[in-house]
Amino acid sequence: MSKLKSKTVYLCSACGDDHPKWYGQCPSCNEWGTLGEYKVAKNRKKGGNGQPRDSRKLADVLHGGEVNRIPTGISEMDRVLGGGLLPGSLILLGGNPGIGKSTLALQILPAIQKPVLYVSAEESEDQVGLRARRLGVNSKTLHLSSENRIEGILDQISLVQSELVVVDSIQTVFSDELDSLPGSVSQIRECGQQLLQLSKQRNIAVIIVGHVTKEGIIAGPKMLEHMVDTVLYLEGDDRHDHRVLRSAKNRFGTTNEVGIFQMEAGGLVEVDNPSELFLAERQDDITGSTIFPSLEGSRPILVEVQALVSNANFGTPQRNVNGFDFKRLAMLLAVLEKRLGTHMGTKDVFVNLVGGLKVDDPAADLAVITAVASGARDKLISESVVLIGEVGLGGEVRSVSRLDARISEAKSLGFKSVIAPAANVKRMKKAPKGIKIFGVSNVGEAFQHLF
């Protein structure tokens, strides 16, 4: 194939803008050292067949009825997507190496009854077949390909007439029209743009698997995340066998939902009750342990908060935390010392959310500060109590969202009492039966109930 004539521009990997010449500092976003060479074919047709597409009236679109989503057969995946795959959408799936991105992408394909193309640019068809055999994936409509040229991938999509395409991964796909190596900014931008154009013109769903950097963000230009409709992150680590699927961007659904999976020999398995998973090995006879119902989207998940407080052996006390914001912990320790008289200046404090779950819900404040106080005072907290509430700098306990859903989850797992913000308790129309609810206006009142 003869290459088309091309011109050279310089693309910023930070903001995605291109410039006619190289600069040390990008004129658009003022970032240094982000401009890279990018070759653009002069006579390449950008609009597919070169013909402009007709416009449509909004009234016609609104009266066209609901678009039917494609179920993936995995309810946790459908929950995060907003009900399933939407035809014409471009989805970016990222995560650390070995976390299970390719496994998840392969497991959702057997439920699709229409032709599906799985493009593994990193592995051969036989290698993908070995994984499919291990996962128990068997489908007569699934086609495998190890093509890594974007032109060849587009040709195979036309031949297969696929309704869903999986490209694993975008960093290994390249275009013949560019001279740069696969994974470069220009290649990722060009191949992503062609896949976007394909999904919109042919109204098919495309899932792109993307690598991440050591900082945990999608590798390549930030423009790739702006280009796609949905950005999914599969989180987890080697020390735990559970995986959390989060949506960082979703044009067709909420970004608050999470999917919980457990990695087993046969692949990723859905976790129907995540609260039981995170509380399975809890010990009731140790200090510094509290329970907090975290709200992940529409789903409450009970999480154990552990705190260990000991005398500092060196001049500067240690502050270590897993799964909770470090700066927020520092604020809670200051409230504990200033408002409640518990001296923490000579204490090492270690806080851990069991199971590796990361929580950014302010309603966890009361559970965290109580766990630290329990460890500092060496006093046990009843194993049947749940704590909910945001703590302010004055030691006040502020209201939280969706208290009823959190209480219902705690009741279903056998907890007998809940300590919650008094403002929330006053607004409750009817208290649930079988569980006691104590409304507190400040942390001191909560400690009176507990200690």
Image: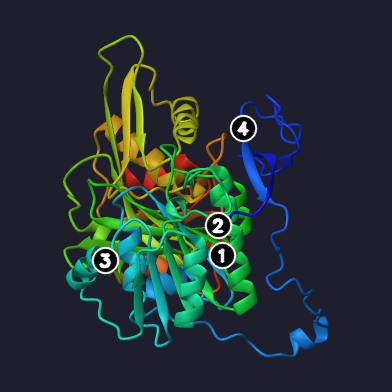
Judge left or right: residue 365 versus residue 56.
left
Report how far apart the C-alphas of labels 4 and 3 lie in the structure.
36 Å
Q: Is residue 332 above or below residue 229?
A: above
Q: Amino acid at mark 2?
A: Cys
SS of the residue under disc 3: helix
Question: What is the crowding at mark 4: few (fewer than 14 residues within 10 Å), some, or many (at least 20)?
Answer: many
User: How far across and how far down the image is residue 201, in percent?
Assistant: 64, 75
Q: Amino acid at mark 1?
A: Leu
User: How far across and how far down the image is residue 108, in percent?
Assistant: 36, 74
Q: Is residue 429 above or below residue 244?
A: below
**First along the sequence among labels 3 and 1:** 3
Nearer to the camera, 72 or 279: 72
Q: Amino acid at mark 4?
A: Thr
Q: Residue at point 35% right, 79% down?
A: 142
Q: Residue at point 55% right, 45% down?
A: 179
Residue behind mark 3: 128
Residue behind mark 4: 34
- The answer to whether any part of residue 404 appears in the image is no
Nearer to the camera, 226 or 62: 226
Report how far apart the C-alphas of labels 1 and 2 lie in the structure.
6 Å
SS of the residue under disc 1: helix
Report how far apart the C-alphas of labels 2 and 3 lie in the structure.
22 Å
Q: Residue at point 48% right, 50% down?
A: 363
Check contact, mark 1 vs mark 2: CB within 8 A. Answer: yes
Question: What is the crowding at mark 3: few (fewer than 14 residues within 10 Å), some, or many (at least 20)?
Answer: many
User: How far across and how far down the image is residue 430, in percent?
Assistant: 51, 74
Judge left or right: residue 133 versus residue 167.
left
Report how far apart the C-alphas of labels 4 and 1 lie in the structure.
24 Å
**First along the sequence among labels 2 and 3:** 3
Residue behind mark 2: 191
